[in-house]
Amino acid sequence: MYGETRSVTIIESPAPRRIRRLAERQTTDRSALFELLDTELVGHLAAVVDGMPVVVPMGFARDGEHVLVHGSTGGGFALRAAAEHATVAFAVTALDGLVYARSLFDSSMNYRSAVAYGVLEPVADDEAEAALLALAERLMPGRSAEVRPTSRKERASTRVLRLPLDDVVMKVRAAGASEAVDDGEDHSVWAGVVPLARAWGEPVPSVLTPAQTPVPGSVIALTTGATRDHRLS
């Protein structure tokens, strides 16, 4: 009606977060973020519960512009945070090497780290099975085809939560030791970078697995590096 006034609530996107210390190491490159999330297997979910901070390490998967995590329907701070629409933080870090400088003060690490902030969203029931499969394929590619289907009871006891990647801050160091010709240091002391490389070890069968049981294809692919570049859409 003409002349009628209405109040309108405008929800604005959060302002981009800025790193205060060593701000030059911040990156907003989404491909770098996705590479980190698609490479690492463990993240740390943090929330405040009853006035106390809680941090739990957990496996995760990136599903497009979201991170997927899961937990038991029987409880857990993640489900509580989702129910209360509380803001959580999810951190992922990759250590790429140690930087040996000519003083302990200048020594450092090469790393990639990211922290996502937001509200966890329960995945709808009709999407839960696909989300659980995405998590399984991220952690153990190809394994789902080698084992029995998940039972109805098992599905009912597991809940998948989704965290949007809308509010993320990422920091990267990928450089050598800080040095200069005229820095006053004794250059006869070795300085440089020791890269960190990780590799899967030899598969160890369980006690009840018969000795003649062949190692499955998913394990062979993982240990030989065939799944190293596995990505979710």
Image: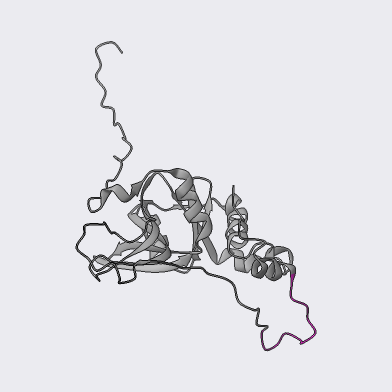
Residue 110 spot, x, y in % from top left: 38, 61
Q: Is the magenta stretch mostly helix, strand or loop?
A: loop
Residue beneath the point at 74% across and 68% down: 217
Residue 180 spot, x, y in % from top left: 26, 56
209 in magenta = yes
Towards the viewer: 195 or 123? 195
Residue 142 spot, x, y in % from top left: 69, 62
233 in magenta = no
Location of residue 13 with respect to 19 vertically, above or below: above
Towards the viewer: 191 or 157? 191
Towards the viewer: 134 or 38? 38
In-image side of 172 versus 22 (left or right):
right
Towards the viewer: 67 or 11? 67
Residue 172 spot, x, y in % from top left: 37, 54
Q: What is the span of residues highlighted in magenta in the rendered image?
A: 206-216
| Residue 90 visible in the displayed image | yes
Residue beneath the point at 30% across and 72% down: 189
